[in-house]
Image (spheres, rainbow, N blue to C red):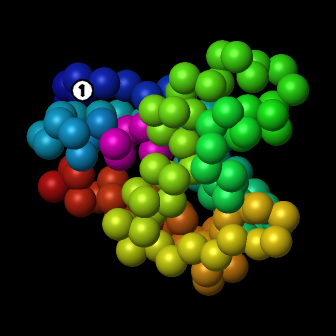
Amino acid sequence: MHYQVVVIGGGAAGFFGAIVLAEALPGIRILILEQGKNVLEKVRISGGGRCNVTNGCEDPSELVNFYPRGQKELLGPFYHFGPSQMKAWLTSHGVQLKEEDDGRVFPASNTSETIIDCFRYCKNMAST
């Protein structure tokens, strides 16, 4: 089998990157390689099993203050794709979200399985 793209790492970033690429280029063949036993395993346990998907702070110049190293390097990427874009993407893919008082954003279901199911569904839709 031939692939146009190979993604090294089946965690949240690798899986999400593959999904976004597949949505942008329908028909592209993508292979996701994961060293661990299961893809998205760290997503399953993140946020105490609830999966903290993003931050409620949507102003990139404010958001970078949460990252003591890399503030300058993250500013541009956060303007391009930050919390508001992540929330919009998840919402458009059927994930209801809730923001807690401290700014953490979780699926309203309070379970990481919601994110895993969303990612797997999107991957399956992109590969058909």
* Residue 33 visible in image: no
Tell me the amino acid under the disc marked 1.
Answer: Tyr
Of the pair 83 and 48, the residue shown nearer to us: 83
Residue 98, how many percent across, how many down?
64, 75
Q: Residue at x 35, y 46 (%)?
A: 19
* x and y percentages locating residue 115 in the rendered image: 54, 65
Give x and y (percent) for residue 107. 61, 73
As helix, strand or loop, the secondary structure at mark 1 comes to: loop
Residue name at image x 87 percent, y 26 percent = 68
What residue is disc 1 on?
3
**Crowding near pointer 1: few (<14 within 10 Å), some, many (20+)?**
few
Looking at the picture, does residue 94 appear above or below residue 21? below
- Quarter of the C terminus within the rendering: bottom left
Q: Main structural element of the magenta stretch: helix, strand or loop?
A: helix
| Image: 127 above or below 3 | below
Name the image quarter holding residue 122. bottom left
* On screen, residue 99 above or below 88: below
Of 33 and 110, the residue lying toward us:
110
Where the N terminus falls, by quadrant?
top left
Horizontal side, residue 116 vs residue 128: left or right: right
Q: State the image coordinates of residue 121 (x, y, percent, origin top left).
A: 35, 65
Residue sitting nearer the eye, 84 or 28: 84
**Is residue 32 rendered to the left or right of residue 27?**
right
81 within the magenta span: no
> Can residue 121 be seen here?
yes
State the residue at coordinates (51%, 77%).
96
* Quarter assignment of residue 69: top right
Highlighted magenta segment, given as a residue range: 15-20
| Residue ranking furthest to the left | 27
